[in-house]
Amino acid sequence: MAGGLAWRRLNRRGGRIDPRIIRPPGALPEDEFTETCVRCGACLAVCLTKTLAPTIAGAGWEGFLTPRLVPRIGECDEFCNRCGQSCPTQAIRGMPLAAKRMAKLGTARVAKERCLAWAYDKHCLVCQEFCPYLAIRTLKNENGTDSPEVIAERCRGCGICEKKCRSDPSPALLVYNDGAGTDASDPPTEGTVTSD
């Protein structure tokens, strides 16, 4: 029984990885990445925010011990490209900072049932305050409280919103690997984004 449960946790679900497995910026497509990565840990060692950790479950045996971002530990710093520079096999490709800043790692989503603003009418827009990509706008909830909404096209999936979220014990913003490996279409500009 326990062995079967462990097998299911480690095995890919229908050939796909868990949607919460966020790969480092510049990572090759998943199958190439898991074949090319030698699990040396060089990227983990140089990560400024220590967000990179070895994958244990959710990426199959092929992905076992490959690096993944864990946003609750730290965000992918927008001005760091050390993981790609340190990778000896180029499973994580080296990228200039300008290209790295535009790389899409995933997309954050708001779990409204846990969000202090959406669910509890508390003034909290910490996610919006910290987002370097201006990917969070405000909407009014049913009681008129400003509440966060992710602008998927702007979100790079860096995870700072998940890291800084005040909802406890689980963050209300979670990053998923939606759109990973693409360039985000709308570059950030100065100022706050709000809805009308």
Image (cartoon, helix red, strand yellow):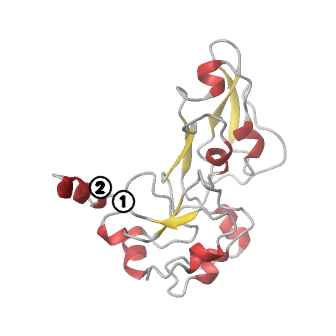
Name the residue carrying label 1. Answer: 57
Task: Identify the residue at horizontal 36%, vertical 62% (top origin).
Answer: 59
Task: Identify the residue at horizontal 73%, vertical 38% (top origin).
Answer: 126
Q: Is residue 154 visible?
A: no
The image position of residue 88, as x and y in percent, is 54, 87
Q: In which quarter of the image is the C terminus?
A: top right
Instruction: Name which residue type carries label 1.
Output: Ala
The image position of residue 28, as x and y in percent, is 47, 73
Compared to 127, does 4 lie above or below? below
Check whether the beta carbons of the residues at disc 1 and disc 2 lie within 8 A of each other.
yes
The mark found on residue 166 in the picture is: none
Task: Identify the residue at horizontal 43%, vertical 64% (top origin).
Answer: 55
Which numbered disc flags the more N-terminal residue, 1 or 2?
2
Residue furthest out toward the left: 1
The image position of residue 94, as x and y in percent, is 62, 79
Please tell me whether mark 1 sits on a helix, a strand or a loop. loop
Q: Is 189 situated left or right of 163 in this image?
A: right
Give 149 or 165, whichever is nearer the viewer: 165
Name the residue carrying label 2. Answer: 9
Q: Residues within 10 Å of mark 1 (few under 14, many from 20)?
A: many
Measure the C-alpha gap from mark 1 to mark 2: 6 Å
Q: Residues within 10 Å of mark 2 (few under 14, many from 20)?
A: some
Compared to 162, does 39 lie above or below? below
Give 49 or 110, whichever is nearer the viewer: 49
Q: Is 90 situated left or right of 17 in this image?
A: right
Q: Is 1 situated left or right of 33 in this image?
A: left
Residue furthest out toward the right: 190
Task: Identify the residue at horizontal 60%, vertical 61% (top origin).
Answer: 51
Compared to 57, does 145 lie above or below? above
Instruction: Name which residue type carries label 2.
Output: Arg
